[in-house]
């Protein structure tokens, strides 16, 4: 089944890259701030789990679910990933307790100043970056061919919909 293969591919890439910039795309006045996050787990249901700094306001004042974008990038990697999805702050004690003993947590237990967030992957765009190990000849050919293109030389991504 294609969606299982897509999810496995995304799990591998997210684990490989490890960290992302979290954007809460809600129109709400009160929303979780943009943060750099480290992925704790990507489960088999297509949820990305991570911790963010706990806001000063009470968690119940925030929207229960909100649109999210995660930009996964790591210097030196030959790819980056942009994930769009739906996010939730995990407040259910049973869900938090079930999550805490996972071996992937390795010292990242949820502390009182952190909040556990999960994001359901609805769409992911995977981009491969060009390697800089080109000969001067290949670099010259690439430069000349870009002059004759009618595009702005953007690399088209591979797009995945694992929740479909």
Image: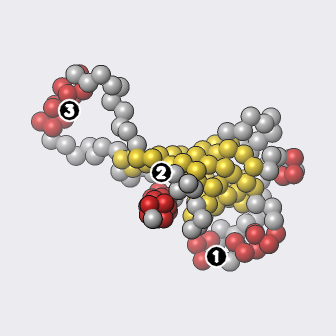
Q: Position of residue 8 (x, y in %)?
A: 47, 64
- Residue shown at the point (81%, 39%) measured from the top left: 30
CA separation in Å, label 3 and label 1? 47 Å
Residues 47 and 33: in front is: 47
Task: Classify mark 3: residues with Cα within 10 Å, few (<14), some (14-19) or many (20+).
Answer: few
Location of residue 82 with respect to 89 vertically, above or below:
above
Task: Classify mark 1: residues with Cα within 10 Å, few (<14), some (14-19) or many (20+).
Answer: few
- Residue at label 1? 102
Task: Classify mark 2: residues with Cα within 10 Å, few (<14), some (14-19) or many (20+).
Answer: many
In the image, is 38 to the left or to the right of 111?
left
- Residue at label 3? 142
- Residue shown at the point (81%, 61%) measured from the top left: 91
Q: Secondary structure at mark 1?
A: loop
- Residue shown at the point (26%, 43%) measured from the top left: 132
Sequence-wise, the earlier of marks 1 and 2 is 1
Mark 3 vs mark 2: give the one in front: 2
- Residue at label 2? 160
In the image, is 140 to the left or to the right of 11?
left
Sequence-wise, the earlier of marks 3 and 1 is 1
In which image quadrant can residue 19 be found?
bottom right
Location of residue 63 with respect to 152 vertically, above or below:
below
Pointers 3 and 1 in contact (C-beta within 8 Å): no
Q: Secondary structure at mark 3?
A: helix
């Amino acid at each position: 089944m294609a969606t299982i293969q897509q999810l496995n591919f995304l799990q591998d890439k997210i684990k490989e890259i490890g960290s992302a910039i979290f954007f809460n795309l809600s129109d709400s006045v009160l929303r979780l701030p943009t943060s750099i996050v480290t992925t704790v787990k990507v489960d088999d249901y297509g949820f990305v789990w991570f911790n963010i700094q706990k806001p000063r306001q009470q968690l119940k004042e925030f929207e229960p679910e909100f649109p999210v974008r995660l930009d996964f990038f790591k210097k030196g990697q030959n790819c980056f990933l942009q994930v769009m999805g739906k996010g939730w702050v995990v407040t259910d004690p049973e869900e938090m307790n079930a999550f805490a003993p996972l071996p992937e947590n390795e010292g990242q237990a949820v502390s009182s100043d952190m909040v556990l967030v999960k994001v359901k992957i609805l769409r992911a765009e995977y981009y491969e970056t060009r390697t800089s190990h080109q000969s001067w000849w290949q670099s010259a050919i690439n430069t000349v061919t870009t002059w004759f293109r009618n595009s702005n030389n953007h690399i088209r991504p591979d797009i995945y919909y694992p929740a479909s």
